Image (cartoon, rainbow, N blue to C red):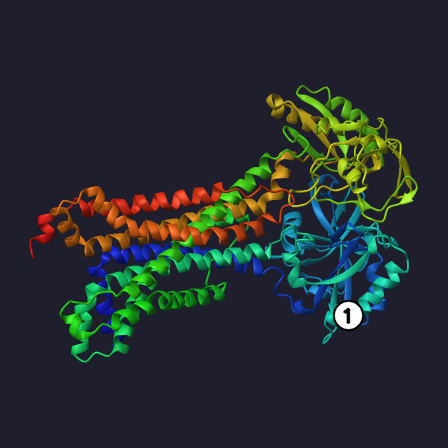
Amino acid sequence: MFKLNLKIAWRNLWKNRGYTLINILGLSIAMASCILIFIFIRYQLSFDEGYKNQDRIYRFTTHWKYSSFEDDTQGVPIPLSAAAKNDLAGIEKIATISMDNGIIQVKDQNGADRIKTEEVVHYAEPEFFEIFEMGWLNGSPETVITEPNTVALSAETAKSFFGTIENAIGKIIVFRKKTSLKVTGVFKDMPKNSSFPLKIMISYQNFPQKDNKSWDSVSSQTECYILLKNGVTAAALKEPLRLFNKKYYQDKKIEGNQTNALQALKDIHFSEKQGNFAELYAVKSELYGLGVIGLFLIVTACINFINLTTAQSINRSKEVGVRKVLGGKRKQLIVQFLTETFTITLIALIFACILTELALPQMESLFKTQISFSIFEHPVIFAFLIVLVVIVSLLAGFYPALIISGFSPALAIKNKITVNSGNMSLRKVLVVIQFSITIILIIGTLIILEQMNYVHQKPLGFKTDAIAIMNVPNDSIAQTKHKNFKERVLQINGVQSFSYCQRPPLSNEMSTTNFSYNGQQNEDFEIRRSSADADYFKVFDLKLIAGKVFLTSDTVNGYVVNETFLKKMNISNPQEVIGKIINQNETKMPIVGVVKDFNDRSLQQSISALIIYPQKDAYYKFAIKMDQAQLMPAMKEVGALWNSTFPNEIYKAQFVSDAVSRYYQSEKIMAILFRVFAGVIIFISFTGLFGLISFVATQRTKEVAIRKVLGASTFELVKMLNGSFLLMVFMANLIAWPLAYLLVSKWLSGFAYRIELGIWPFALAFLISMLITLITVSIRSYKAAVANTIDALKYE
């Protein structure tokens, strides 16, 4: 029976191959888009999976709450690990891990550098390996870095340094030119979908801050992970953790209502407030948004299928009548029409898989990661394809099958079947739904593009053009060379100004502290600290609105505060703060100037209350402002001077403008996705609309011919055929506008600085939808209106 149904299905599909092509085209593009979305969402959801005890792994986070200031970090105080191990009974294992970076040297037999490279390293307590149970190719987690001056390498790093894994064991690498580390183990490479890009793991005994006892000294580069005992849940630790926070923060009078909390391993990749070592994260709301877009695509394609199939049902009425007279049951007819839908869907899936393979390299380039479409490597993809085919077949085919199989045999044989007004109304409703979805995506795309344009064009309060920034060594020997290096760089043609600093003006690197102002302790907020020399303001073109820049000096002699600091202190006159004393970290100095506000974090976040002051020991970078016309020659000379001044260091520069643009990478990706998928839905919608008007025009050929004979003009005939479609798209706009407004308002609320929603995106979406509808429908209706009337009436 199935073979017979398949033959009949193939014959009917080939007979109506024009409409079959439209359906396959729409379904294949929609399904390919859904597959791509599913692959990406599956990849994001797979982060940090595969560990044996992953449901029992948590990390500590730190939270501060002032009356008008809150902050979060994944960092923890150094003494937390030992204290938690003693005080929290539900913990089976606990380990601190801290990220750092420095130059790694691998020497040859003569003591010369065979390899010299700057690498990220991690100091880790031995129990870290027992918590995560990483695969070991050589060595054991219990002993691998228990001793000082030992290191474990990833397989890729071991091969890069020593050729093979076996050769690496027992060899020596030098860290920061002074610490010799013996390789005692090699572990498997961390997967790409991991929050732990671990390559070089150094014994925690070598961690310079391991003996720090301060509970209010927190760095985001130091994390602490725990493995809960079997049967213990995070909820069970809620009360013990409250007592723990009271003991080590509240009772010790630590500022800022500082507390620690637990975060599940599975939540780390989706944490917007706290980061991770890989600096990779996904926003769950954006993943949900992508999922909704995928659903929209399938619904749109299925609506096309339903509309075209029910519209063509009249042409198959005689077939239905004959089969019913010959004893065919309705159930058999439903199976027949579902088989046709399944055949179309299966063909569409084949094309969708081809389109997916073609689009995958572009998707990998967009997301800057490797994404696999192998059903053997990821069986869940195969399961998704099966579910997709079944859902689409039922969603697109079940209703048309019910309608067509329900025709009266007597009327069907006489070819007197008409699609009643109820079904016609349903088809109109489906068209309205389809175009409402399309218009929502058009509006969303326009507003996302406008917001991203605003983000890139909004003045940040400082200049980024032709400014390069790079790390500089800051040990005692290097510091003696800083002054001479700066003087020589300023003599290079094309270099306009030079500054030593802690960080660029806009940076996610946070260093905040409590403070007192004019002798009174502030308890409302913390200030963000940034160290820089006096030329920092010149390099980045920061504007002073009161006072002056601090004196050129290697030591703290004055603070420059920003306007936000004044606002948070409820001070309206900038001159009022000049000379007032700020005490932070036992450093008392007067405020010497007030700088105009600039965005120190991305536009998704508000400007911080900020102090800038000179402190030579904190100058980890230098910034150079150059003439745009002489940029590359100047950079080349700076590099040569660097190599001669700091021969043991590695020269690695980046432009500030590039660093700033990376803060909006997620939003850029969303803008691209909305553009692509909005385009796909527009294409699917108007392809279906063209097929629908083609069928309507064919059905009304005789009516058009009679009206033409009776004197109707071509314009009147086109208007008659177009009217109902334009009305449906108009109604779709009325439905889409409020829904789109709610969705884009929610998205914009994630930005501290955002555009004001105006009428123009909604008006433009209206014009685009109406214009494309008018063009699409008019092309086909004009063809019907100018057709030869004799051909239409000669059989009457």
Between residues 167 and 349, which one lies in front from this camera angle? 349
Location of residue 520 with respect to 295 vertically, above or below? above
Query: Residue 549 vs residue 121: left or right?
Result: right
Residue occupying the point 61% across, 63% down: 49
Q: Quadrant of the C terminus?
A: bottom left
> Amino acid under label 1?
Leu
* Residue 444 % position (x, y): 49, 48
**Residues packed near mark 1 inside 10 Å, few (<14), some (14 to 19) or many (20 plus):** some
* Residue 372 % position (x, y): 49, 57
Between residues 182 and 441, which one lies in front from this camera angle? 441
> Label 1's element?
helix
Query: Residue 710 vs residue 779: left or right?
Result: left
Location of residue 564 with respect to 241 vertically, above or below? above
Residue occupying the point 22% across, 60% down: 14
Query: How many discs mark residues in the rendered view?
Result: 1
Location of residue 185 with respect to 118 vertically, above or below? below
* Residue 775 % position (x, y): 30, 43
Tell me, yes or no, if residue 713 can be seen here.
yes
Tell me, yes or no, if residue 353 can be seen here.
no
The image quarter containing residue 551 is top right
Between residues 50 and 102, which one lies in front from this camera angle? 50
Q: In which quarter of the image is the N terminus?
A: bottom left
The residue carrying mark 1 is: 237
Query: Residue 341 vs residue 786: left or right?
Result: right
* Residue 549 % position (x, y): 81, 27
